[in-house]
Amino acid sequence: MVFLNGKLLPIEDAKIPVLDRGFIFGDGVYELVPVYSRLAFRLDEHLARLERSLAETRIRNPYSRAQWRDAIYRLVDAQPFEDQGVYFQVTRGVAKRDHAFPKDAEPTVFMMSNPLVTPAKELVEKGAVAVSAQDNRWLRCDIKSISLLGNCLLRQASAEAGATETILFREGKLTEASASNVFVVKDGVILSPAKSHLILPGITYDVVVELARANGLPLELREVAEAEVRSADEIWVTSSSREVLAIVTLDARRVGEGRPGPVFARMYRLYQEFKQKVMRAGKRDAVTA
Ligand SMILES: Cc1ncc(COP(=O)(O)O)c(C=O)c1O
């Protein structure tokens, strides 16, 4: 079952008019929330980011926070599997094609939930391969826009190289990856770019930052030079579906020892323990680190 404009229905019956501005202009925003044992992980943070994306794009938010939560859990409860990835998007709605905003279009809300696919144990233990590219996306990467052509082109470069991710540099500085945030470790210090309009404020990024701080791991959020990434002891990518994943090869060169490092191992464990804590609490409300 999927959710379209307030109704649950089979995906075959979910139809969008061709003049939807999501289809015509990519004029919409989205979220993807991981659900473990039917509990949405960091749902309030995902909803806060959705509210911000809607405000920044001036798309009317059709639902209150409580209505979003209800709709998401209705969809979660309608699936036959426990661990899910709930994708939801809001577009500016259906209107005659014109770049300027329509006056009275209703936002379109679509949600679907698929089985959550997290990295296989073998990939977590061995680490993943990445390539790099120049970050040629627009300058509002802080908005979780459905206009993902730049990200798709960049991700395709790694797909064609048989790699898991494309790590991005803009003017000699690390930004993020095509569908994840990036952390590096140098001499025991965890580094990642501070939030700005050049990166998506990742929910997993926030969890990693909170876990590092709560456990006394040295962490600096600041500009990270391309040279620092290329000489890093460890590189990780983070996202709701990849969780925390070590990159052991970048552009065909070994990262550190060429296997997931000790700081990664610590953070991976902390992340899994935090997930367990959330699941044990068993509440559909927020749980903090
Ligand atoms: C470009 C980009 N950066 C970062 C992320 C990670 O965000 P989150 O941890 O909220 O999934 C994503 C997730 O899809 C992304 O597409």
Image (cartoon, rainbow, N blue to C red):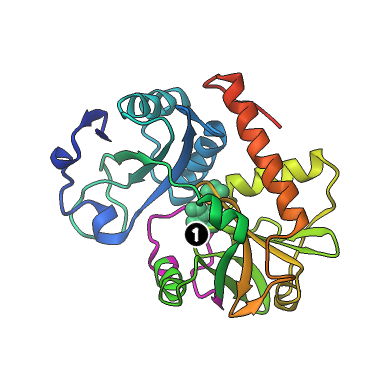
The region drawn magenta spans 132-151
Helix, strand or loop for disc 1: loop
What residue is rendered at 44% in x and 68% in y?
A: 155
Q: Nearer the viewer, residue 103 or 87?
A: 87
Q: Is mark 1 within 8 Å of ligand 1?
A: yes
What residue is rendered at 73% in x and 74% in y?
A: 225
The vertical placement of 97 against 111, above or below, is below
Residue 144 part of the magenta-drawn span: yes
Specify the amino acid type for callout 1: Ala
What residue is rendered at 16% in x and 43% in y?
A: 15
Residue 18 part of the magenta-drawn span: no
Q: For the stretch drawn in magenta, what is the main secondary structure?
A: loop
Instruction: Name the side, left or right, on which 281 lies relative to 119.
Output: right
Would residue 198 be seen by someone viewing this image from the given angle? no
Residue named by callout 1: 179
| Image quarter (top left, top right, bottom left or bottom right) of the N terminus | top left
The vertical placement of 280 against 258, above or below, is above
Q: Nearer the viewer, residue 236 or 284?
A: 236
The vertical placement of 86 against 76, above or below, is below
In the rendered image, residue 265, in percent from the top left (x then y), is placed at: 72, 51
In the rendered image, residue 74, in percent from the top left (x then y), is placed at: 34, 24
Q: Could you say which quadrant of the image residue 253 lies in?
A: bottom right
What residue is rendered at 38% in x and 67% in y?
A: 149
Instruction: Name the side, left or right, on which 14 lies relative to 219.
Output: left
Assess disc 1: are there few (<14), some (14-19) or many (≥20) residues with their C-alpha within 10 Å of its C-alpha: many
| Image quarter (top left, top right, bottom left or bottom right) of the C terminus | top right
The total of numbered circles placed on residues is 1
